[in-house]
């Protein structure tokens, strides 16, 4: 990685930079494209003459606090307080191709993208180095000005100070002279003991705007002369539009145009409400579609595919012999249904297309995908297209897709005016890329001590990556798809495709297979991807094994993870903090463990179940070792949020399909957990300086099995399908 | 033609009286702090005050609120920051933030009629949906706001 001094002249066009100042870019961890080299591109660090710091970051802010954390990483090394950060935005930039995805895919995935809980992993060092480079330049500039040795000039709180003479200069005063110096190759980085900001619960940078109502989300983009619109999709999965009957829709006051696309029609009007009314009155004529599709035939397909030979995922020892030697063999089956993302902000985007250029404003997890859609629709070259990433009102994997970018681009191109498209909640729910449904079969062979000697497991469900227009390199011809197998002895082993079992449960004989069983409902990435269904199956089945073998669930896991000291520490701490085995009268405990993205975690829940099957979750204890924590408040928010996301999926709704149509449509028939349902949640972070693991998704997969295991403790009824339904418990 | 009184200011709007207040605020008055989440009064992202009471603005029409005092998040704090917004900032509640203005409006209305709400009161009154899971921080901020209002 190299820090380059960007050519300031090119930025003077922009009014914010008119006064001159220090402008830095990064290079080397992302190969500069031709467009980057001509530097008509914005800088991502700009220190203005007033000392204010303006920061462009690669990652979209969707609630995970990444703007704040990246700014902290920079501010730590730059020796400024957070109050000196005047501006942060997600910047679409060729330098911001995601290094972790590139590393995992031998550069096949080379996009600016936010997802997979890997923003911090990818960007923490570059942003520290960026801050340190600016600090060194400012120190050097001050030393020159004073004609003193640079070693005597120290950066502190937004100023360079010289202790001997008591002189000091603000960064703003030094920014112009600093911009004339050459950046150092390897500026020194602080050691963790020297951190002022990192690790602490620093308030979020975005809170003010979000509390005042001034934060601009995708739905809030407002341009002069803008038109408003919405979309209406064909209702049956796979249907295509053949025509529309739009007489009634066009009669709705304010409706301006109806534009048919492949599987949807766009309704444009002078207000969003008029467009939504118009869409109601619009009749779509369609052809094709999978009208016979239902939950029943999906699960039938899975059951029949269970007999097929799968694609190998992980293998160790001799599972066949282990099963033959086992004194007891347990056959267990778990099912997870589809789930929608249901982000609070419905899908939306705005575009302004003219023959000369195009701008897109979108709450997108991938500005590069938005760029590609814009190039496709407008046929303009990339330098004529600008993508702006707004705040996301939740993403959870849905907004990494780019389907919602099409309608505003087409509508603006056709109508010659800017157009903002907002989906209705009903369209958002029905036309999601859902969490894939899965059927998982587990066969355990136990030895004389009740310990698992062997495990054979088969995962049956769709290979979701197969749908993507650019198949990722982890998708193999035989259907192997890491996105859905991760979490079942299949960690982040890309791109070599050799499962790293060194930290996994020490079951000596192991065979994990995946039977790809594609369905006609669109599925995609849902917070925690494959770990979601796989942790439910693995952690529920280990609870069953514990009971069958006469082991405490903690003791069983400790024996199986004896080789993994970080896991053992998390297990010990969580047993202690949760008061394992000492639940108050009438309450029952359940636990689960997972290691996901180098984050080791245990969740313990306390539930009670009424005679009529009503589950009350009273308390959740979550103990996490995710390596180095940079902002403990945001880390806890992410874990708590992830837990409640998973708890909603475990206790509330599911997505069903009947006659080829999605049954649910809004928060009334796809209910969410609310304040009254929210238990006490204790999150404990184990402090260390290991490399940072993932946190954005980590909380989600463990809570379902932990609750299911607690429900078993309370009722003796084993939950093998989520969500847990009252009727199953009475 | 209708007159809406929003945040103390009168606006004359040429609108169908059946237009939901939400869309009049967002598209016509450009008050984007009030959010669209569901359109069926389930999520509360569009919560505003009508004559001091928390109302989901997607389920009430422009015709319904003519002559009434409407307050949106933009008008919640008249001078310095409103105690609920202050408490929200101290607790640092928001994640994605999309539901938060509605949550704040619902909580501010609750504290107007119940200065010291219990946890049960909060459960009953604040039924907004947050998909990021800020609920426990919301509860903490409401208790904190009650203290701020009391002058503690």
Image (cartoon, grey):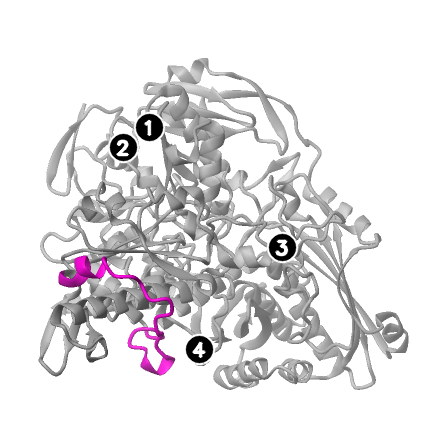
Chain of the residue under label 4: A
Spatial CA span between label 4 and label 2? 45 Å
> How many neighbours does mark 3 have within 10 angstroms: few (below 14), some (14-19), or many (20 or more)?
many
Q: On the picture, is A492 further left or further right than A88? A: right
**Residue A284: x and y, percent?**
54, 21
Q: Nearer the viewer, mark 4 or mark 2?
A: 2
Spatial CA span between label 2 and label 1? 7 Å
- Tally the numbered discs: 4
Label 3 vs 2, first from the N-terminus? 2
| In contact (CB < 8 Å): disc 2 and disc 1 | yes
**Residue A68: x and y, percent?**
32, 62
**Residue A607: x and y, percent?**
53, 72
Spatial CA span between label 1 and label 3? 37 Å
Q: Which residue is mark 2?
A: A223
Q: Could you tell me which quadrant the C terminus of chain A lies in?
A: bottom right
Work out whether A155 lies above or below A350: below
Spatial CA span between label 3 and label 2? 38 Å
Label 3 vs 4, first from the N-terminus? 3
Q: Which residue is mark 3?
A: A483
Q: On the picture, is A260 further left or further right than A552? A: left
Q: Which residue is mark 4?
A: A684
Chain of the residue under label 2: A
Label 1 vs 4, first from the N-terminus? 1
């Amino acid at each position: 990685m190299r820090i380059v001094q960007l050519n300031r002249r090119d930025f003077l066009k922009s009014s914010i930079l008119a006064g001159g100042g220090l402008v830095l870019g990064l290079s080397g961890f992302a190969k500069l494209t031709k467009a980057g080299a001509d530097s008509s591109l914005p800088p991502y660090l700009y220190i203005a003459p007033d000392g204010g710091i303006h920061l462009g970051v690669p990652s979209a802010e969707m609630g995970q606090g990444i703007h704040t954390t990246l700014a902290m990483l920079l501010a730590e090394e730059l020796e400024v307080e957070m109050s000196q950060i005047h501006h942060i935005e997600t910047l679409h930039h060729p330098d911001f191709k995601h290094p972790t995805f590139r590393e995992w895919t031998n550069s096949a995935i080379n996009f600016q993208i936010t997802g997979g809980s890997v923003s911090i992993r990818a960007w923490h060092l570059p942003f520290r180095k960026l801050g340190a480079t600016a600090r060194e330049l400012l120190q050097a500039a001050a030393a020159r000005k004073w004609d003193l040795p640079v070693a005597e000039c120290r950066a502190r709180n937004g100023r360079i100070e010289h202790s001997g003479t008591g002189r000091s200069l603000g960064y703003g005063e030094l920014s112009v002279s600093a911009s004339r110096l050459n950046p150092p190759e390897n500026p020194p980085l602080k050691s963790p003991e020297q951190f002022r900001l990192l690790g602490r619960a620093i308030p979020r940078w975005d809170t003010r705007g979000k509390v005042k109502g001034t934060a601009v989300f995708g739905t809030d983009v407002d341009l002069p002369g803008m038109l408003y619109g919405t979309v209406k999709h064909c209702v049956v999965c796979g249907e295509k539009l053949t025509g529309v009957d739009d007489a009634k829709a066009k009669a709705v006051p304010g409706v301006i145009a109806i534009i048919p696309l492949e599987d949807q029609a766009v309704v444009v009007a002078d207000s969003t409400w008029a467009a939504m009314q118009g869409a109601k009155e619009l009749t779509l004529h369609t052809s094709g579609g999978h009208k016979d599709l239902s939950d029943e035939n999906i699960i039938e397909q899975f059951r029949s595919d269970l007999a097929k030979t799968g694609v190998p995922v992980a293998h160790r020892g001799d599972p066949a012999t282990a099963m033959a030697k086992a004194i007891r063999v347990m056959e267990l089956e778990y099912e997870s249904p589809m789930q929608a993302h249901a982000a609070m902000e419905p899908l939306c985007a705005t575009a302004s297309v003219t023959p000369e250029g195009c701008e897109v404003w979108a709450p997108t997890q991938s500005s590069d995908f938005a760029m590609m859609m814009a190039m496709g629709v407008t046929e303009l070259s990339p330098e004529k297209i600008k993508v702006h990433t707004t705040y996301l009102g939740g993403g959870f994997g849905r907004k990494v897709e780019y389907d919602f970018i099409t309608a505003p681009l087409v509508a603006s191109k056709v109508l010659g005016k800017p157009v903002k498209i907002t989906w209705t909640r009903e369209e958002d729910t029905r036309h999601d890329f859902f969490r894939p449904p899965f059927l998982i079969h587990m066969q355990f062979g136990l030895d004389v001590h009740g310990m698992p000697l062997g495990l054979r497991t088969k995962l049956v469900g769709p290979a979701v990556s197969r749908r993507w227009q650019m198949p990722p390199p982890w998708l193999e011809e035989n259907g192997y798809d890491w996105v859905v197998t991760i979490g079942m002895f299949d960690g982040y082993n890309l791109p070599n495709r050799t499962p790293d079992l060194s930290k996994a449960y020490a079951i000596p004989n192991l065979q994990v297979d995946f039977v790809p069983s594609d369905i006609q409902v669109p599925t995609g990435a849902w917070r925690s991807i494959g770990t979601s269904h796989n942790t439910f199956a693995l952690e529920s089945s280990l609870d069953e094994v514990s009971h069958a073998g006469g082991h405490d669930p903690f003791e069983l896991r400790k024996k199986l993870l004896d080789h993994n000291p970080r896991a053992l520490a998390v297990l010990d701490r969580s047993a202690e903090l949760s008061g394992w085995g000492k639940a108050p009268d009438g309450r029952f405990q359940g636990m689960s463990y997972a290691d996901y993205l180098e984050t080791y975690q245990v969740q313990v829940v306390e539930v009670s179940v009424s005679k009529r099957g009503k589950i009350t979750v009273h308390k959740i204890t979550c103990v996490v070792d995710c390596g180095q924590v940079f902002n403990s408040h945001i880390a806890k928010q992410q874990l708590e949020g992830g837990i409640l996301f998973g708890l909603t999926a475990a206790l509330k709704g599911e997505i069903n399909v009947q006659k080829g149509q999605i049954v649910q449509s809004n928060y009334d028939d796809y209910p969410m957990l609310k304040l009254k349902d929210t238990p006490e949640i204790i999150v404990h972070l184990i402090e260390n300086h290991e490399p940072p693991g993932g946190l954005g998704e980590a909380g989600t997969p463990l809570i379902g099995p932990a609750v299911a295991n607690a429900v078993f403790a309370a009722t003796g009824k084993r939950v093998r399908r989520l969500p847990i339904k009252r009727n199953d418990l009475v | 033609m209708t007159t809406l009184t929003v945040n103390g200011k009168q606006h004359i709007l040429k609108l169908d009286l059946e237009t939901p207040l939400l869309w009049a605020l967002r598209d016509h008055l450009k008050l984007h702090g009030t959010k669209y989440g569901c359109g069926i009064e389930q999520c509360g992202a569009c919560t505003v005050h009508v004559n001091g009471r928390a109302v989901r603005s997607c389920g009430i029409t422009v015709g319904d609120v003519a002559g009434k005092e409407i307050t949106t998040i933009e008008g919640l704090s008249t001078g310095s920051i409103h105690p609920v917004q202050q408490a929200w900032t101290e607790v640092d509640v928001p994640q994605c933030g999309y539901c938060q203005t509605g949550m704040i409006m619902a909580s501010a209305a609750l504290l107007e009629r119940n200065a010291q709400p219990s946890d049960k009161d909060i459960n009953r009154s604040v039924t907004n949906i947050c998909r990021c899971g800020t609920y426990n921080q919301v509860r903490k901020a409401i208790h904190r706001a009650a203290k701020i209002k009391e002058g503690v």
